[in-house]
Image (cartoon, coloured by chain):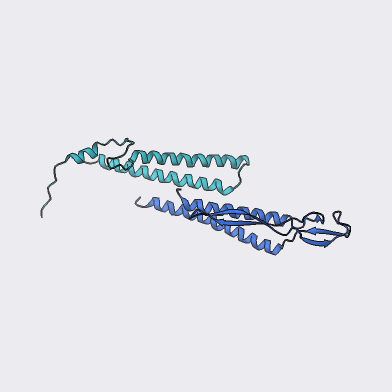
Chain colours: A cyan, B blue
Amino acid sequence: MSIAPIGPVGPSATNAAATPLTSSTGSASGAPGFASALGGAVDDLQQAQATSDQLNIKAVTGGLDDIHDATIAATRAQVTLELFSTVRNKAVDAFNEIMRMQA
Amino acid sequence: MTFDAIGVAGTGLTLHRKWLDAISDNIANINTASPTSGPAFQARYVEAQAGEGTSGVYVAGAAFGSAEGRMVYEPDNPLADAKGYVRYPDIDLSSQMGQLIMAERGYQANAAVVDRAKETYQAALEIGRS
């Protein structure tokens, strides 16, 4: 049984690791970075929750045309929050996995 | 748009709600008499139009029933003309009741789609969790 030797860490690998996570310009390939994607998701979530809040206020003050508009907005906000929380948990899990790595 | 199935079902809910409103108005006015000098109450019919692509359904406008109505001989009615006639709207109650059931079931079906779509998206979020 033979074990393949681990190659030396090249400059390409170190460059990728050195790219700051908070960079809004994205990775070297031009794809949007994780931080900007997360920021966009936060914006979407806030938008969904604000819409739901406005419609809930309309519902109790009597300015609501469609009942389902309020319930659909609440559903959207709930699913968006669950999506965001799932992505966040995955990211934290990945971070913890990396932190557990031993030399 | 995100969670599009929920939004598309929302347009269906809106359409059926408006249809329900129109039927409600038609049934409420089914016995509304008017003088023969003016038009009878005209039944309102909602016109549906499919949205572009998969964007759902929208109300294109409303069509109205006969303004002539039914001429009914009611000489005791204060609205009656010299010959004793008044106009009643030409609305068929059984047709309206049939449409009422269709509008109700359509609304319920679209509401069910919203729930199922939500469950589907939640199932997608459960992938790889355990």
Q: Is residue B49 above or below residue A11?
A: below
Percent position of residue B112, x then y: 52, 56
Percent position of residue B7, x then y: 50, 50
Give the quadrant of the N terminus of chain A.
bottom left
Q: Which residue occupies the foreground of this view, B57 or B68?
A: B68
Q: Which residue occupies the foreground of this view, A70 or A27?
A: A27
Q: Which residue occupies the foreground of this view, B23 or B60?
A: B60
Q: Is residue B64 left or right of residue B119?
A: right
Task: State the image quarter where residue B75 is shown.
Answer: bottom right
Q: Is residue A97 above or below residue B39?
A: above
Percent position of residue A29, x then y: 28, 42
Give the quadrant of the C terminus of chain A.
top left
Percent position of residue B115, x then y: 50, 54
Q: Which residue occupies the foreground of this view, B59 or B18?
A: B59
Q: Is residue A12 left or right of residue B59?
A: left
Q: Is residue A95 left or right of residue A12?
A: right
Q: Could you tell me if residue A102 is visible in this image?
A: no
